[in-house]
Image (cartoon, rainbow, N blue to C red):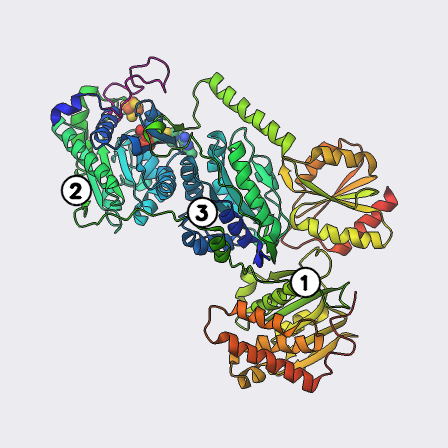
Amino acid sequence: MRMRLMRGNEAVVVGALLAHCEAFFGYPITPANEISEGAAKLFPLAGRTFVQAESEVAAINMVFGASSAGARCLTGSSGPGISLKMEGISYLACAELPAVIADICRVGPGLGNIYPSQGDYNQLVKGGGHGEYRVIVLAPNSAQEMCDFTIRAFDLADRYRTPVFVFTDGCVGQMMEPVHLPDLPPKPEPKPWALIPGAETNSNLVTSIFLEASEMESIILKLQAKYADIARDEVLCETYRTEDAEIVLVGFGIVSRVLRSVVEEARSEGLRVGLLRPQTLFPFPTEQIRELSERARSILVVELNNGQMVEDVRLAVAERCPVEFYGKMGGELPAIDDILARLRALMVEA
Amino acid sequence: MAKKTLQKPKAFQDVFTRKSRDQKTTHYCPGCGHGIAHKLIAEAMSDLGLQDRSTIVAPVGCSIFLYYYFDCRSLSVPHGRGPAAMTGISRVRPDTISISYQGDGDLAAIGTSEIIHSANRGENIAVFFINNAIYGMTGGQMAPTTPLEMRTTTSPRGRASETEGFPIAVCELISTLRAPVYVERVSLDTPANILGARRAIRKALQAQADRKGFTLVEILSPCPTQWRVDPTKTGEWIRENMHPIFKPGVYRDVLAETPSRPRPERREMSDGEMYALLGIDENATIRALPTGCEDFHLAYRFAGFGGQGVILLGMLLAQAGMASGYQVTWLPSYGPEMRGGTANSSVVLSTRAIGSPMVAETDVLVAMNGPSLEKFLPTVAPGGCVLYDSDPIETPPAAPDGVHLYPVPARDIAQQAGEARAANVVMLGVYAAIGDLFEEEVLADALRKAFAAKKGAVEANRRALAAGADYARSHFPCPAPDRPGVMVK
Ligand SMILES: Cc1ncc(C[n+]2csc(CCOP(=O)(O)OP(=O)(O)O)c2C)c(N)n1
Ligand code: SF4
């Protein structure tokens, strides 16, 4: 039995090691510290590189360098640290370098606090840094998915040559659950474009500056074509009891766990409620939500923020049914009873 | 020797095809120092046989397109981040000759953090720092190295120390650190000094090849355009305005006594070694759930002062729960919550997929001190139970209706068992006896895993566990007739 109890944050480190990640660069921040600490402990023992950087800015640029040299690499942070990394992420996206970044989101804006939050949704899903780029955003809700999605993130990052976020909140990061370790994935393919010593690579160049307007436009268009492929092929989402649901709940990360309990309670009261959980936020499960909106009486989006994903849900639904929002901010999780009360009221209204 | 500089080095491109086809002129202004510095570096690369191993940073600044000219790998980095990017490269590809080429705005303003810390870590990179006392690319703004009283577009009345500080002397700054092995300032003001620069650059690259660590060569370099000085007069300008504040010379040189670093070997691990490193016990088994527990969902809270082991107590229960076939989650209090001195962890054991791991309603509360008991007692659900350390808590607050209290002198029992710190494990023993959830071997195994690193601790804690169970059996009905905390919900 290849199973062990571990924290979500630790599972990111384990997933990275299994995925042949060669290097970790990071700067301490709660509630993501176990990623740095786990990497500090395990990476050198596995013959991999660990560097505690002087800042998140330095960390993402170490990733930029190591990735340009063809190494799979990881960094992890939270809220304010992710803001600092955004310049580097924009460069990674334009230079088409793979990288995996974990955001164990805490409450913001400002220093905020270290409790669970999903306030970084817009920052990650809509770009965050400068210019017209996107990053893939995976949204695990358990320690198992923290491991599995990290492995998947490395695969996607290499395949599309793009930064990939593993995005969750302090609760999933801190929580311990059993994790079943998968078989070791195959070694990554060699990267002929990488800055690896050798006469044959002397002309290799990794850059993100293109002075000619037409050349720059073609680079941007190439990125957009890649994002279109990702949007078509890489959507992941999970549904629970939506077949006959009159009201569909939509939530990701830790919220989806609370919503699953809500669905069970609601069903025991005879309310026909289901749940859709996006496992990827970019690409967003637009099609899946649109389909449900054709059958549902209404949709209730629950987030640990002021209503960020709900905008994407509204775009997908395009007014086929009402889309309501329930948000919790400051660090507490939504209470099952509060959401149930909202559901009962919606059932009457609808 | 001097003749060689006149020939085109191999590492310098014949035609600048990266610029555009058939280009043979550089993009630099006439009399610019960047071109000279490029040639000296390319020549050293070629002569030392390092071209095929070199990767050079293209910084943000006038030299942003230096890769038009160098025939080697190049990386265009964000403004000031060259040393961080090169840290990444040289750590994962140690055979690389890692060169961070940077201007004064890049290195001494926006990139100060990266240069100081990569120097302080002693990264195996060579830094070539072009100090031209001004921002060239953006059009002649003040740099951190701009001399006092010099007029620039952002110091139109001349740089004043009261508001703009003093020119930063980078070699002096870097040489206060212990890790750098070679720091020298050279000047491109005369042909003789250019030869000196040539020598310093070769020395730095040789140190790279020898894996000696961090080197920095500061190159005082002309920018006739932004200085608004005739290209033939820049040498004079450097001597007059820069030499007094940026004295050329060797600031640190411990190359001779510094041994070459061993090349880090990337050891391949077998799958088995990897899983062992990750703490996987391939022989561990998960038991089938005991009968009577097929539909079951319990929420636990363990609370006390930091240091009383309530975080660990939760983990032990979660570990035993997992091994017994339950779904489990464990969640600690974290951050400032811990700092006030109290800590808690919550655990959910269930036969179903667990939704929220946050415990709002508690079925089993274990409180190791008074404040914790007071705080969490109101959260205990009817039918639930509370185990508390009766040592510090002599008179407990009134229990809510239907909540069963179990006072346990946990510290006493632990002391008698020979491990004063094991009051938490005594509580686990008590709960195991009244709750009757786990096989003894499962609990023993959880202790073995938790205390594997501490010699003797496993035995002491097993005694504490047994003492707790004995205490429960002689003071409370075991298993509890109403099976507190084991009722089917
Ligand atoms: C984050 C960021 N801030 C500002 C700039 C604009 N910028 C480009 S070059 C430069 C100054 C470069 O000066 P220096 O390093 O002295 O190099 P030189 O051009 O003199 O060779 C600045 C501020 C930028 N590209 N990125
Ligand atoms: S502006 Fe100055 S640094 Fe830039 S190319 Fe011209 S002379 Fe060189």
Q: List the residue tagged with mark 1.
A: B325
Badge 2 density bin: few <14, some 14–19, many ≥20, Cα 10 Å: some
Q: Residue furthest top?
A: B22
Mark 3 lies on residue: A24
Q: Amino acid at mark 2?
A: Val
Q: Amino acid at mark 3?
A: Phe
Name which of mark 1 and mark 2 comes first in the sequence: 2
Mark sitting on residue B254: none
Q: Position of residue A126 (x, y in %)?
A: 59, 35
Residue A66 lies in magenta, yes or no? no
Between residue A293 and residue A321, name the one nearer to us.
A293
Q: Is residue B61 above or below residue A310?
A: above
Q: Identify the image quadrant of residue B413.
A: bottom right
Q: Position of residue A176 (x, y in %)?
A: 60, 58
Type of amino acid at the residue the image marks with label 1: Gly
Q: Between residue B59 and residue A143, name the one nearer to us.
A: A143
Q: Quadrant of ligand 1?
A: top left
Task: Determine the secondary structure under disc 3.
Answer: strand
Taking B406 as reference, is B485 above or below it?
above
Using residue B327 as the reference point, say whether residue B274 is left or right of it: left
Identify which residue is drawn at 30% across, 25% down: B70
Which is closer to the viewer, label 2 or label 3? Answer: 3
Please report the bounds of the magenta region as a residue range. B10-34
Question: Which numbered disc, 1 or 2, marks the residue closer to the eye?
Answer: 1
Main SS, magenta region, reads loop
| Crowd class of label 3 (few under 14; some 14 to 19; many from 20; radius 10 Å) | many
Name above or below for residue A191 compared with residue A139: above
- Decide which of B243, A217 is in the foreground and name it: A217
Residue that mark 2 sits on: B250
